Image (tube, rainbow, N blue to C red):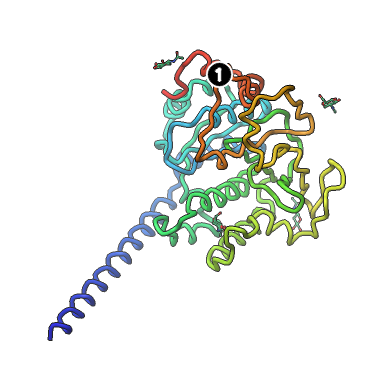
Amino acid sequence: MNALKVSGILLFAATAGFIFTTTQRMLKVHFLISRLSKPSMVNKRAEEILKHGNGVIFLETTDRMEPSSLVLCSIESAARVYPDRPVVYFMKGLQDINSEDDEKRAKGKFPSLSPFNNVHILPLRLDELFNNTPLLPWYIKANPKNERFWIHNLSDGCRMTMIWKYGGLYFDTDVISMRPITEKNFLTAEHTHTSGSSVFGLTPHHSFAWKSLNDFVQNYNGGLWGNQGPSLFTRVLSKLCVLSDFKTLDHIVCGNITFMHPQRIYPIPYEQWKKYFEVWDNMPSFNNSYALHLWNYMNSNEKKTVVIGSNTLVENLYKYYCPLVYDFLLNNKSTVI
Ligand SMILES: *[C@@H]1O[C@H](CO)[C@@H](O)[C@H](O)[C@H]1NC(C)=O
Ligand SMILES: *[C@@H]1O[C@H](CO)[C@@H](O)[C@H](O)[C@H]1NC(C)=O
Ligand SMILES: *[C@@H]1O[C@H](CO)[C@@H](O)[C@H](O)[C@H]1NC(C)=O
Ligand SMILES: *[C@@H]1O[C@H](CO)[C@@H](O)[C@H](O)[C@H]1NC(C)=O
């Protein structure tokens, strides 16, 4: 009798739980559909700013609203290297923007960026971004709480969707730009046969981006790829051609994609990331590189930072490539209002 009661209660609880989660999901879908039927101001602004397909795109996919000095340095260096291109920082935690005043206010929060006319700060609205791409159903179904790599995977999906929609250049926020990349359709090699995803560029609606978005969703469901699995970029690229070895500093052509030599962005490989925080006898010229990836994720435990007066490589890079952020640090001025 008791066993019957207990199983009755369990069944009831399970049913209630099922109804609850199903209802929640339906509400989420309903909410998304009603939002997506009337595109917001944000989307229109992004389309306007990025309409020439020559933008430089940075993303913050968490709700964090206090970018580190490295993030600000990364954006400032791009604003200087690409004065004729819009540089857009999309932040998930930013409030909606409905007017020019809202836009000015958003930019005013970051005084080391506000003097740059080509810098724009816009909210990142994932549902609108993923609309009309294979990632929308994936996004609706996904449950961030159950996914260890949610932010990591989300950010891979976001960057490729951005470049699919708008074209241009994508940079991680731990990349310091030194000279302009003029190539339009390219990926950057980290190692001989491995593509990094920290820096890449494509023209709008490029077939590589579309293939990547589909591959992302397919392999996501399969859960085939473990930690050691090749990155999305390497996977899709290796379907276009057989990647040969780099014999010189020159790039490799794969289909209609240029695969750049590791020296272009990763002259210091990730195993040596600490070198950025060391004092060098001579400042290297990095004259075979367009930009430097500082491997911030390798630094997540040690949290090494720029120390003013330390004469480390990173301090010298700040001085040359983001002098305004450097000046803020030097004078102990706040970089976020
Ligand atoms: C999600 O991220 C993890 C960790 O980097 C990775 O191993 C996995 O392949 C990713 N999943 C997809 C579908 O990209
Ligand atoms: C790139 O090559 C693919 C075929 O691999 C083709 O479908 C696509 O149109 C090409 N894109 C551009 C921008 O040339
Ligand atoms: C690169 O830098 C090295 C060392 O500073 C210098 O000797 C060399 O001439 C430079 N090469 C170019 C192409 O600027
Ligand atoms: C920088 O400013 C903070 C707060 O205004 C203060 O606590 C700190 O001592 C200052 N540091 C220097 C080196 O001036």
Q: Quadrant of residue 34?
A: bottom left
Q: Measured along the vertical axis of the image, is residue 164 above or below residue 21?
A: above
| Quarter containing the C terminus | top left
Q: For the point 36% across and 58% down, which residue is it?
A: 30
Percent from the top left, x then y, of residue 126? 47, 48
Extreme residue in the left direction: 1
Percent from the top left, x then y, of residue 336? 44, 24
Residue under numbered circle 1 = 308
Percent from the top left, x then y, of residue 294? 62, 36
Extreme residue in the bottom direction: 1
User: Relative to 324, is 255 on the left or the right?
Assistant: right
Q: For the point 75% across and 30% down, which residue is it?
A: 286
At label 1, counting other C-alpha atoms closer than 10 Å, the crowd grade (few under 14, some 14-19, many 20 or more) is some
> Is residue 187 visible in this depiction of the protein?
no
Extreme residue in the right direction: 247
Percent from the top left, x then y, of residue 96? 41, 37
Q: Quadrant of residue 174?
A: top right
